[in-house]
Image: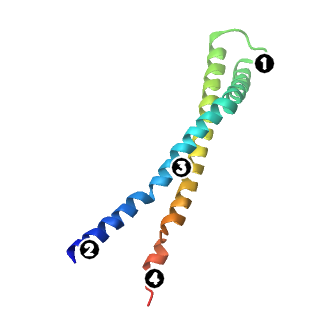
Amino acid sequence: MLYRYARMKNRKEDIKMKTREIAKKGLYTGAGVGLVLFAITGLLPGSFIGGMIGLNIAGSIFGTPLEASLIPRIIVGASMVLGIIVSGMVFVVGSSLLGWLVGSAVDTVKYGKKTAAEATVKTK
């Protein structure tokens, strides 16, 4: 009897440990896909949009015909880098979240995880 209880307990722990495996794999796969998508489609537009924002900021501070001085170049360069970082975050975080959600849905369907409301309701 004790052996049966221990085996049943181990089985529940195995299922508990396995339930998050697909969600983790989905998260990592989504992050990888997001990184590839960012490298292909997000890097150049991110720098263009950031550069245009930097030109607008520098133009409003120093006047529209910008001179080739150091501070406007720093502003434009920093805004280009910021545009690339924001674009990367959107691609990587967005696709990671999507992959995690898909993995969690598969985990829920595969292992039949109950919600908190279903767990508290007692059935007769």
Of tags 4 and 2, which is closer to the observer? 2
Task: Determine whether label 4 and label 2 are within 8 Å by CB.
Answer: no
Of tags 3 and 2, which is closer to the observer? 2
Helix, strand or loop at label 2? It is helix
Q: Residues within 10 Å of mark 1 (few under 14, many from 20)?
A: few
Q: Is residue 20 above or below residue 33?
A: below
Task: Determine whether label 3 and label 2 are within 8 Å by CB.
Answer: no
Task: Determine whether label 2 and label 1 are within 8 Å by CB.
Answer: no
Task: Determine whether label 3 and label 1 are within 8 Å by CB.
Answer: no
Helix, strand or loop at label 4? It is loop
Q: Which residue is mark 3?
A: 26
Q: Quadrant of residue 102?
A: bottom right
Q: Amino acid at mark 2?
A: Tyr
Residue 17 % position (x, y): 38, 58
Q: CA distance from mark 3 to mark 2?
A: 33 Å
Q: Residues within 10 Å of mark 2 (few under 14, many from 20)?
A: few
Q: Amino acid at mark 1?
A: Thr
Q: Amino acid at mark 3?
A: Gly
Q: Which residue is mark 4?
A: 121
Q: Earlier in the sequence, mark 4 or mark 3?
A: 3
Question: Is the N terminus in the top left, top right, bottom left or bottom right quadrant?
Answer: bottom left
